[in-house]
Image (cartoon, rainbow, N blue to C red):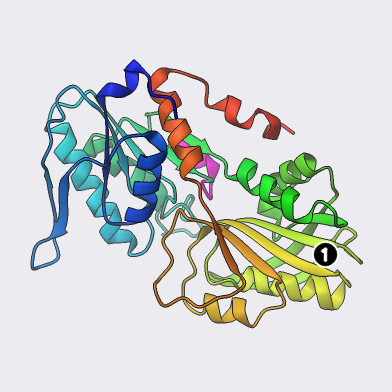
Amino acid sequence: MKSRQEDEQVVLLAGNANRPFAEAIANQYGKPLAKAIVSHFSDGESRVEINENLRGCDVFLIQPTCPPVNDNLMELLVLADACRRSSVKSISAVIPYFGYARQDRKSSSRSPITSKLVMDMLSTAGVERILSLDLHAPQIQGFVNIPVDNLYALPVLAKDVDSKYAKEDIVVVSPDVGGVRRARILAKALDCPIAIIDKRRDSPNQSAVLHVIGDVKGKTCILFDDMVDTAGTLTNAANALLENHNATRVVAYATHGVLSGEAIERLNNSKLDEIIITDTIPLKNNINCPKLRVISMAPLLAEAMHRIITGESLSELFERYSTNS
């Protein structure tokens, strides 16, 4: 990336949530991560000590709030507070995976809106801008009175689909009604049809496939979702597409690989040919899943951070993939 004068006062800081990803972003940006101690006291409290001068600097805090969510969120808040008290010029939180995004409304009479709570905490800690990737609930951008840039992994994932499966008869499949808009944009970019899984969720992390809307017979199905958590949705969808609707094969793309619970076992035993995720969440060291492939989002985020500093348009990165489609 070509550096400009505006980048000279930029400082990149990272917590422990996904250090390799933060280093990849820093490498793409052309600046090393600032020296800082991000650890814990013996009782588990987050401890932060920044060992560089931050006065008058534009700081990017790179910290996805992935598992362990509460620990990583607290690290981010303490980092923001440390920066605010160091007389920085601005604080931008780069949160590729935004935890608590699924609790975006009152689902019952006495339930919280936790994503609003997290946004309030970030703003109170001193964060002045949030940069995220494929928010599970885009309306979260309106939960706080600071700029929230929700980037899309779609251009990177669409390029991969095109390079791997362009010669096949493909159809983009939304695993649920909530993902139809996202799937439609990908289908438009690939110039292929779309299908929708009609799914009923009886309880959190459990799903039941009812039927498929659209023609998938004899086609390669590209399942497209923003995250894969327990993998129940994707594996059930793959079974329905292959067994009940005679699809040729099923490939899954998801931005965030949460992969909790029995996800890896489910994926290994599933009928999915391949599962492609991004590196926004680190994979556990003991994961063994030959079907899993990881694509890096570091170049996209580094470019977005650069454009924020130089005042260039972020929407130009996604003009081909307009959400108004």
Instruction: Answer with the quarter of the image where residue 111 lies.
Output: bottom left
Please tell me which residue lies in front, 235 or 104.
235
The local secondary structure at tag 1 comes to strand
Quick one: quadrant of the C terminus? top right
Q: Specify start and end residues of the magenta stretch as a single range.
A: 135-141
Residue placed at 46% from the left, 58% from the top? 109
Please tell me which residue lies in front, 73 or 273.
273
Instruction: Check the image and report above or below for 114 versus 11.
Output: below
In the image, residue 138 lies in the stretch drawn in magenta: yes
Residue placed at 67% from the left, 63% from the top? 252
Residue placed at 87% from the left, 62% from the top? 219
Residue 274, can we see it? yes
Instruction: Check the image and report above or below for 304 versus 41.
Output: above
Residue placed at 46% from the left, 75% from the top? 287
Provide the residue designation for mark 1: 212
Q: Residues within 10 Å of mark 1 (few under 14, many from 20)?
A: many
Instruction: Check the image and report above or below for 283 versus 105.
Output: below
Q: What residue type is labelled 1?
A: Val
Residue 257's spot in the image, x, y percent?
Answer: 51, 62
